[in-house]
Amino acid sequence: MGQAVVIPRAHHPISRDDISDNALKVLYRLNKAGYDAYLVGGCVRDLMLGLRPKDFDVVTNATPEQIKGLFRNCRLIGRRFRLAHVVFGREIIEVATFRGHHSDSDNNDKAKHASKQSDHGQLLRDNVFGSIEEDAERRDFTLNAMYYNIADYSVHDFANGMQAIQSRKIEMIGDPEVRYREDPVRMLRAVRFAAKLDMQIAQASANPIPALASLLANIPPARLFEEVLKLFLSGQGLATFKLLQEFNLFGQLFPQTAPLLKNPDSRETRFIEQVLINTDNRINSGLKVTPAFFYAALLWYPIEQRCQQLMNEGGFNAHDAFNLACNDVLDRQLQRIMIPKRFSIPMRDIWMLQSRLNKRFGRRAYQMLEHPKFRAAYDFLLLRGDIEGGELHELAEWWTEFQQADDNGRKKLLSDLQGGSQARRTNKRRRYNTKKKA
C-alpha cells in the first residue's frame, strides 16, 4: 500500500453538518491536545456515499490511557484490542489507537507480548500500536480505509476506496485468505456490506469464503450474536440471507436450520424469506423489531422436526415431545450463537403459544388476548398460515376476526366454533357406529 491520496475539502462531499456533534467534540479535543484525530471506517464510507452513518468511529495516535486522561466520560474496554469508549448519554464514540503490524522477530518482545494468534491464524490479542499508514493496512476492506482529518477537513484514501465505491466492489486489503483467517467474522462483514451497499464482493475476495466458512466455529458465541443482529436486522435481511447461503455461511450460523432449506420452494425456505421481507419492511419504515421473533422463526421448523422424531422414536406424547424439542434445539443453537435470556424467553413463549392458539373454547380465547406475548404469537401464526395454508390458515383467520369483532361478534364466533365442534364429534360417532355395525 502506497501513500494516501489526499482529497481536499473542496473535492469531497463530507460536511461537518452531517457528523455527530459528540464525534466532533472528541475529534477537536484530541486535536487541541496535540494528537492526530480522524474519523475512519464505515462512517466515512457512508458519508462519501451520501448515506447517514449509524455511529462514528475515531482513530488517533493517542494511546488508550492518554485518551482516558482527556475525557472524564471515558471507559477502556476490550482484550483483543484495547479501545476507548467516550460516553455521551445514549451515544458512544469509539476511539481507537492506530494499529501497527505484528513482528515475529525475537528482538520485538513487546509487540510479541501485545499480539497473539491461534493455530488457525486467528488474532486472539492485537494491542500493537503503530502509524496511520500501518493502521490503514490493517483495515479490512478498501472502502473502509478512508480517514477524515479534523485538522484540515481532508479525506485520506489509503487503499483506493474511492475507486471501490465507483466500481461498487467490496475488496479485501491484502491476501483475502490470510485476512479471513485472522478474523473469520470478516467473511460475514463482506456479505453484510455487499447487501447493505448493493455492491458485489470482488472475485479474489469472494473465492476463499466457502472453503473457510467453517472457521466461524472458532468465534465466541456472544460475538456472533451481535454480528447476526447486524446481518439480519439492518433492513437488508433477505439479500443478506441469500448471500449467506451462496457463500456457505448460513449453515455455520444455523446448522439445524440449513439442511431444511435446500429446496428454494420448500415451506421452510418460503417461511424464512417471508419473515425477512416483513422484517426489512418494518425496519425500513422506522418500526421496531425484536430479535426474539426472528430467532423463533429461524428455529421453528427444526423444532417441529425434532418433535416428530421424539414422538416416533421415543414414544413421547405431543406435549412432552414439543417441550423437549424446544429445549434440544435451543441448547444446540446456543452452542453456536449465544442468545440472551431476554430474547430466548420470549422465543419460548411464541413457540408454546402456537398450540394454545388452537384451544379457543370458553374463556380461553379471552384469556389468550390478555397474554403479553399474544400479538407476537398471533403474527407468527399468521405467517405460518400464509405459507402452509389449510387448517392453519383458517385458524389464523379466526383469530383475526376475533380480535376485530365487538363483544357480540366474539360470542357468535365462539358459539359457531362450539357448534362446529359438536357437529364434527357427532359425525365422528356416526362413522364409528356405522363401521362397528358393518
Image (cartoon, rainbow, N blue to C red):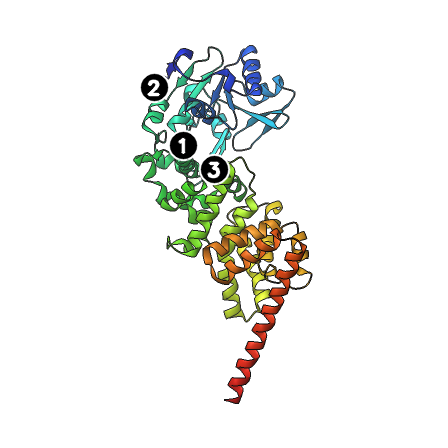
Position of residue 298 relative to residue 232, above or below, is below
* Circle nearer the viewer, 3 or 2: 3
Coordinates of residue 384 in the picture (x, y in percent):
50, 55
Tell me residue 191's x, y (percent): 40, 38
Circle 2 residue? 2
Relative vertical location of residue 429 with respect to residue 344 in this rendering, above or below: below
Q: Position of residue 66 (x, y in %)?
A: 58, 18
Q: Within 10 angstroms of label 3, few (less than 14), some, or many (20 or more) residues?
A: many
Contact, mark 1 vs mark 3 (Cβ under 8 Å):
no
Residue in the image at 44% along x and 38% along y: 236
Tag 3: residue type? Gly
Dot 1 or dot 2: first in sequence order is: 2
- Of 78 and 319, nearer the camera is 319
Residue pictured at 44% horizontal, 19% vertical = 147
Q: If the image is split into quadrants, where does the N terminus sit?
A: top left
Amino acid on which disc 2 is placed:
Gly
Residue that badge 1 annotates? 197
Which is more toward the observer, 249 or 425?
425
The residue under label 3 is 235
- Above or below, 366 relative to 88: below
Front residue (pair 426, 293): 426
Q: Secondary structure at mark 2?
A: loop
